[in-house]
Amino acid sequence: MKNKKPLVSIVMPVYNAGNFLLEAIESLQNQTYQNWELIMVDDRSTDNSWEILKNLTKEDKRIKIYQVKKHCGVAFAANLALKKVKGDLIARMDADDISLPWRIEKQVKFLQNHPETIALGGQCELINQEGETIGKKEFPLDNAKIKKMIFWSIPLQQPTLIVNRKLLPKNFKWYEKKFNVAEEVELLFKLFQYGEVFNLPETVLLYRIHGKNTSLQNPKRTFLLTFKTRIKAISKYSYQPTISGFFLNLIQFFLIILLPNKWIFPIYSFLRGMKRVSLAVLPKPFLLQKRAQIS
């Protein structure tokens, strides 16, 4: 892998992302690293996403598209896409985000220079639905800190993820459907068993926060599923949380149960150091939906 440009298979589940889809795909087409394929699975969108995808395949033969028979969730769509990949390096991307031009090139170079690395992410700038910068989300760089952090917060943003498939067993099971909206946390616990996980210090992705983010639709459910994956990791994947991580997770559990939905995201943003991000930056339809949930 060190002396050539390996094929990078980019996996992108799609569901009602028509407003952002072209921008997401163009960000991949504009990469400085061009030896890639893009596998996209439409999860039975009800907007114009499927029509956009069909038009794109006529223009770029590196793009392969599939559509499921009924809406099944992001984990199912991603697993289907993963069955179609050809590359030894597998990158994840979401249909509403933007990969910066150097993302894939920098990640491939890192993996070539660190063959023990199973997975790699990077830093994120946060944008709203209009593409305006609203903050930044920073992640730990080294394997030890990432493994420590995962028991109380997300240490790697999924749409920055790239995995060295050569280090995985042939029967590796990627995403668990029952952990939809927390599927990336469970995946990271699995990946820890096969190599080290790192984040690049550079910003590689513009992560879009808007009213339809899967994880924001029901923050209580998202956290509770994440909590379950962490407990499962202790028993099934021999993960050993730190004492501080264990108590932080426990405190979060009780806070999430007690807090109304409208406070969860602002408090999380503050504790996570996501500068300038608050509920005020989210679109009005999302705020109205949140108010309706607690009224």
Image (cartoon, helix red, strand yellow):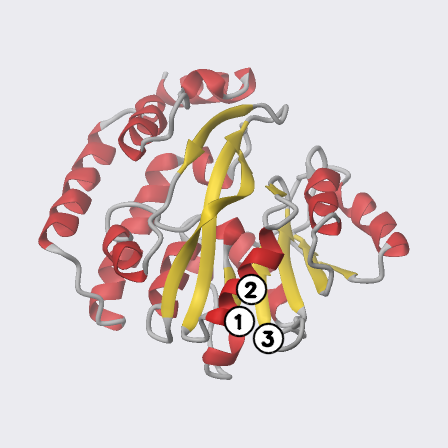
**Identity of the residue drawn at 48% across and 19% down:** 281
Give how far across and how far down residue 82 sits, in percent. 60, 68
Assess whether mark 3 and mark 2 are in contact (beta carbons under 8 angstroms).
no
Instruction: Name the spot of residue 210 as percent of width and height, x first.
Output: 54, 29
Write the residue at 29% across / 45% down.
Answer: 153
Image spot of residue 161 (x, y percent): 50, 56
CB atoms at circles 2 and 1 under 8 Å apart?
yes
Could you tell me which secondary element the residue under label 3 belongs to? loop
Whole-angstrom CA distance, mark 2 to mark 1, is: 5 Å
SS class, disc 2: helix
- Is 175 displayed left or right of 2 in the figure? left
Pointer 1 with pointer 3, Cβ within 8 A: no
Give the spatial CA distance, label 2 vs label 3: 14 Å
Q: Amino acid at mark 2?
A: Lys
For badge 1, the amino acid type reads Gln
Q: Please give the label number shown on residue 109.
A: 2
Question: Which of the 4 image quarters holds residue 97?
Answer: top right
Read off the residue under disc 3. 88
Q: What label does residue 112 carry, if any?
A: 1
What residue lies at 55% left-to-right and 53% top-to-bottom?
74
Residue 277 against residue 102 in the figure, above or below: above
